């Protein structure tokens, strides 16, 4: 992003939303009535022939992104700042930065699965 958001990532738009959307589509496609992103992915996975390890990787990535989002909002709130969904990856410790990179790789995988299955 440019301007005041240069160098930051929107963890809601680019991080958690792809998982939420995929879980909804997969739930509809598989006829599962589960609610919640993780429950939908777990219920739809076997019906759509998605390997359990792949589904669990997606869920772990989703949870990590959500944790970073909430941690950032907590820190902003504690500092008296307006809360948002943005994070500067350069301010993360090395481990969190590496896990975030892998989480975004998982995001691309779930999006790729949707693109293949539903011609998106």
Image (spheres, grey):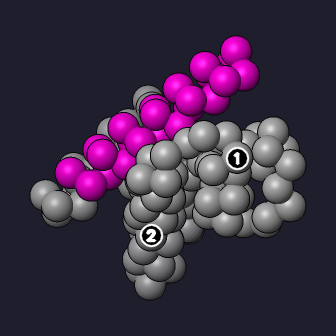
Q: Secondary structure at mark 2?
A: helix
Q: Tell me where residue 93 sits by quadrant.
A: bottom left
Q: Residue furthest left?
A: 94
Q: Where are the magenta residues, as a range?
A: 98-120
* Figure check: 69 above or below 29: below
Q: Position of residue 33 (x, y in %)?
A: 86, 61
Query: Hey, which residue is sitting farthest top in the picture?
Result: 119
Mark 1 surroundings: few (<14), some (14-19) or many (≥20) residues within 10 A: some
The disc at residue 47 is 1
Q: As rendered, which of 114 and 19 lies closer to the eye?
A: 114
Mark 2, other Cα within 10 Å: few <14 / some 14–19 / many ≥20: few
Q: Alpha-carbon distance for marks 2 and 1? A: 28 Å
Task: Answer whether residue 98 is visible to the viewer in this image.
Answer: yes
Residue at image position (56%, 29%) is 113
4 lies left or right of 114: left
Secondary structure character of the magenta stretch overall: helix
Q: Is residue 109 magenta?
A: yes
Going from N to C along the chain, the mark reached first, 2 or 1, is: 1
Q: Kindly give the residue lying farthest to the bottom in the view shown.
A: 78
Residue marked by disc 2? 67
**How far across and how far down the image is residue 108, in percent?**
46, 32
Q: Nearer the viewer, residue 32 or 109?
A: 32
Q: Position of residue 14 (x, y in %)?
A: 53, 41
Q: Is residue 78 above or below residue 47?
A: below
Give the residue drawn at x 67%, y 40%.
Answer: 48
Q: Do residues under tags 2 and 1 come within 8 Å of each other at their CB atoms?
A: no
Q: Residue at x 47, y 79 (%)?
A: 74
Residue 55, above or below 73 = above
Percent across and percent down for residue 102 are: 30, 46
């Amino acid at each position: 992003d440019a301007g005041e958001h240069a160098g930051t990532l929107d963890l809601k738009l680019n991080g958690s939303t792809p998982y939420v959307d995929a879980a909804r589509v997969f739930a509809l496609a598989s006829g599962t009535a589960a609610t919640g992103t993780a429950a939908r992915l777990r219920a739809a996975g076997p019906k759509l022939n998605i390997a359990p390890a792949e589904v669990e990787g997606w869920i772990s990535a989703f949870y990590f992104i959500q944790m970073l989002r909430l941690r950032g909002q907590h820190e902003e709130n504690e500092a008296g700042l307006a809360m948002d969904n943005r994070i500067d990856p350069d301010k993360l410790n090395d481990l969190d930065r590496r896990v975030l990179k892998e989480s975004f790789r998982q995001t691309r995988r779930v999006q790729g699965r949707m693109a293949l299955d539903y011609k998106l």
